Image (cartoon, rainbow, N blue to C red):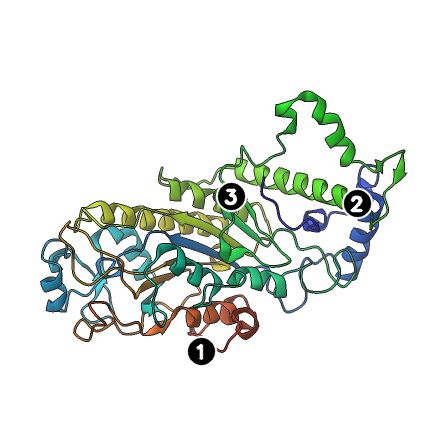
Amino acid sequence: MSQANPYTRREFLRGGLIMASAAATLPTFLNASALAMHRAFGGLSSVPGVPDERILVVVQLSGGNDGLNTVVPYGFQEYYRARPGIGIPEKDVLKLSGAEGVGLHPQLRPLMEMYDEGLVGVVQGVGYPNPNRSHFKSMDIWHTGDTSATGDGWLGKYFDSECVGFGKGESGTAEAPAGGPPGIAIGRSAPLAMQGRKVMPVSFESVDLFRWAGQDIHESLRGPYDALNRRETGEGQAARADSNAAFLMRTSLDAQVSSDMIRKAVANRPSTQFPQTDLGRQLAMVASMIRAGLRTRVYYVNHGGFDTHAGQGGSNGRHGQLLNQLAASLKAFYTELKAQGNDARVMTMSFSEFGRRVGQNQSGGTDHGTAAPMFLVGPMIRRGVIGEHPSMRDLDSGDLRYAIDFRSVYAGILEGWLRAPSKDVLEGNYRALPVLAQKA
């Protein structure tokens, strides 16, 4: 199973747990260092100045979401001329208050309700210079925050530089309290965005599979695994902290704790009814983990199927169904968070690797394009429409020209919400887009 950095031990401090009570079962070096960390930080699980109560949830819309049929420029006749078969009729568009000539796809009504409640920010015309139309290359650009698509993930760099127990000194010392898995991704593999040099996120597709499965292979493997998680190794001697045995003990014990902790959290179902869709299932699990008190900073979920080259449809087509799943899932997610009293702690950001071409193709769909909108959700965000809709007349070879660099959005989230220096994380100077309400 995928697992966080082997030095992760935050769970042993979670909830004010006193490690001495576990001395009979934990390795000596782990017990001692955990006690020192707990005393040094008064039981806190964060370094001063790092707001570990704040959570970011990233919703990736894979395949290239058609931004023009998501945030619809119904006030521009060029839109309808370019899309005679798939354009959203003005009568169906959900008009956005405070925005002239733009509105939401009719299948986004649950999101529109949240918008009217002041919980949604629509960032228009987001992209980057010299856009790439390859799914893989463009997604890597968004994940790394680098137009060369090289380097570590932007969230991974945030974890490395800012999160507890990582990038703050040697792990297992009073200078670096254990922070636990700062990132959890729902999926078969951890996204590049969350991969750093020191920290790897926990990732799993199903909590039923997020466990040690050796005993399922053969019962004889249970004993050695249990022994690895006990105090003694080898011939009954405690392992030195720098030994290979100690490393294996740390890795095994951390994996077991994370597995038990997450599976227990997800087992407590939300009180809110979530859509019976893959995205609904993912966000329901995230809501359960937040309710359980995990100090994870970033959760990452995926909503795919947006590569609509053919049969995209208009108000009630396949693209609209995907948007409805997004909106209904986000609505249920924030209804659940509010019931928990956690809604003010959680900001959600949605993005896609690129938008679609302005004109429809001959297959009743749209091909790979460039700029597209992003959604920011939560009671802390700057509500309303942010930025001007890209011009429908001044096109770049049939594509929209971007107006807001996506790294400015990242910088706004890093500095405004996560309170991290965006220059260090993004390895460049990008104007931080104001993403929070002035009162935040």
Label 1, secondary structure: give it. Answer: loop
Q: CA distance from mark 2 to mark 3?
A: 36 Å
Q: Residue at the location (26% across, 52% down)?
A: 109
Choose the circle earlier in sequence order: 2 or 1. 2
Image spot of residue 239 (x, y percent) = 85, 43
Q: Label 3 belongs to which residue?
A: 288
- Dividing the picture into quadrants, the one containing residue 229 is top right
The amino acid beneath tag 1 is Arg
Determine whether the residue tagged by mark 2 lies in a helix, strand or loop. helix
Q: Is residue 267 above or below residue 223?
A: below
Q: CA distance from mark 2 to mark 1?
A: 46 Å
User: Residue 53 sits in which quadrant?
Assistant: bottom right
Residue type at the position of mark 2:
Asn
Where residue 91 sits, quadrant-wise, is bottom left
Tell me the crowding category of disc 3: few under 14, some 14 to 19, or many 20 or more residues within 10 angstroms, Cα based. many
Mark 1 to mark 3 CA distance (whole Å):
35 Å
Q: Foreground: 263 or 129?
A: 129
Residue 50 to residue 293: above or below: below
Q: Which mark is residue 244?
A: 2
Callout 2 touching callout 1 (CB < 8 Å)? no
Q: How many marks?
A: 3
> Which class describes the residues within 10 Å of circle 1: few (<14), some (14-19), or many (20+)?
some
Find disc 1 in the rendering and name its residue.
431
The circle drawn on residue 222 is: none
Other-residue count near label 2 (Cα within 10 Å), few / some / many at <14 / 14–19 / ≥20:
few
